[in-house]
């Protein structure tokens, strides 16, 4: 299966923007400095809230580099999954919603709302240690393996977003690989990323691609990628994703996984942190879920409407 239509779609969505990186299945756009600073500040406060709640007997200082100040304590937080997702808990859910609202403001700057069908309600803050770990690398869905998110059940018309934010994003980044063709028998959910490993043999790496702070990267779901761990430092980034209104004639083998139920309207997604809140009953306690590396960690999150009947609706472009 050739990916010409995928390339044309991504170019169309971003055709009005000045791109800092312009590759066939990967583009990036600079984030306005004020909004980038607000997003970084919100993530630092989220990390700080985790620290003071999990280590109540210790003293921590809020700053613009919490990750670099307290790397050891942050890595021992119990809300981090096997693939590094830093989950929101009851003690930190308000701080999480603030981060979400900052992400939505950055996305609104792109001016591509007309291309959005639905948005994934959860944003993922992902913490990655640059030191290789043979144990975690063997997990079925380890992000250090070359993979497509199609293989975890994501929709074929999904567009993925990356926000590199804190730490060593240069050495602990992401590598991208464009397949010459994507086998139709791999347009399905896999049990292990290794099942699709051979596709990398017929792929071209985007050697010039950068996982750079201050940019938002937009990626087609058929672009293969992997987390880089080459003894760099800690880094934290945010993942988000939406389903494009422009559909391609690509069919998945079997049904899309339960992840699709987590997609909501763009209007509701923009309203998170305002008239809607992401909520959870899960406490800040050791993670006891799936350690295979599977991204299915969202069942514990609810979308709650806190808007009163007479409240005005939230307009991202007027606030």
Image (cartoon, grey):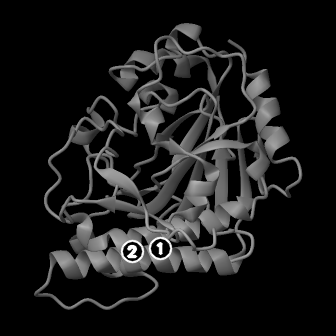
Which of the numbered marks, if any, corresponds to residue 145?
none
Q: Position of residue 91 (x, y in %)?
A: 24, 72
Residue 110, image quadrant: bottom right
Residue 207, image quadrant: top right
Q: Position of residue 118 (x, y in %)?
A: 61, 43
Disc 1 secondary structure class = helix
- The residue at 48%/60% (across/down) is 237
Q: Where is residue 295 in the image (x, y as percent from the top left)?
A: 36, 40
- The residue at 86%/58% (across/down) is 18
Near-viewer residue (304 or 279): 304
- For disc 1, the marked residue is 98
Q: In this view, does 66 lie above or below 229?
A: below
Drawn side of residue 47 relative to residue 119, left or right: left
Residue 70, image quadrant: bottom left
- For disc 2, the marked residue is 95
Q: Where is residue 292 in the image (x, y as percent from the top left)?
A: 25, 35
Task: Please say if the residues under marks 2 and 1 sit with CB atoms less than 8 Å apart.
Answer: yes
Q: Residue furthest right?
A: 16
For label 1, count other residues whose C-alpha is less than 10 Å away and answer few (under 14), some (14-19) or many (20+).
Answer: some
């Amino acid at each position: 299966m050739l990916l010409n239509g995928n390339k044309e779609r991504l170019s169309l969505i971003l055709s009005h923007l000045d791109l800092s990186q312009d590759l066939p299945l990967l583009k990036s756009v600079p984030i306005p400095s004020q909004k980038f600073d607000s997003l970084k500040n919100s993530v630092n406060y989220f990390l700080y809230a985790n620290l003071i709640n999990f280590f109540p007997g210790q003293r921590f200082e809020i700053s613009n580099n919490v990750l670099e100040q307290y790397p050891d304590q942050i890595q021992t937080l119990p809300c981090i999954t096997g693939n590094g997702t830093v989950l929101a808990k009851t003690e930190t859910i308000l701080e999480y919603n603030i981060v979400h609202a900052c992400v939505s403001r950055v996305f609104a700057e792109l001016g591509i709302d007309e291309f959005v069908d639905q948005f994934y309600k959860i944003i993922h803050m992902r913490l990655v240690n640059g030191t290789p770990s043979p144990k975690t690398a063997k997990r079925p869905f380890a992000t250090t393996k070359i993979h497509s998110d199609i293989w975890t059940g994501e929709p074929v018309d999904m567009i993925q977003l990356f926000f590199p934010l804190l730490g060593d994003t240069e050495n602990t980044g992401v590598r991208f690989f464009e397949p010459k063709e994507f086998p139709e028998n791999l347009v399905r959910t896999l049990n292990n990323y290794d099942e699709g490993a051979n596709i990398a043999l017929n792929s071209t790496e985007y050697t010039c691609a950068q996982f750079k702070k201050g940019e938002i990267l937009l990626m087609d779901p058929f672009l293969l990628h992997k987390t880089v761990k080459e003894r760099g430092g800690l880094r934290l980034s945010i993942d988000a994703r939406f389903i494009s209104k422009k559909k391609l004639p690509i069919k998945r083998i079997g049904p899309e996984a339960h992840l699709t139920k987590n997609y909501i309207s763009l209007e509701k997604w923009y309203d998170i942190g305002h008239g809607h809140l992401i909520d959870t009953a899960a406490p800040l306690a050791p993670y006891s879920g799936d350690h295979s590396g599977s991204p299915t960690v969202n069942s514990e999150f609810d979308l709650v409407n806190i808007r009163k009947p007479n409240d005005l609706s939230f307009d991202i472009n007027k606030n």
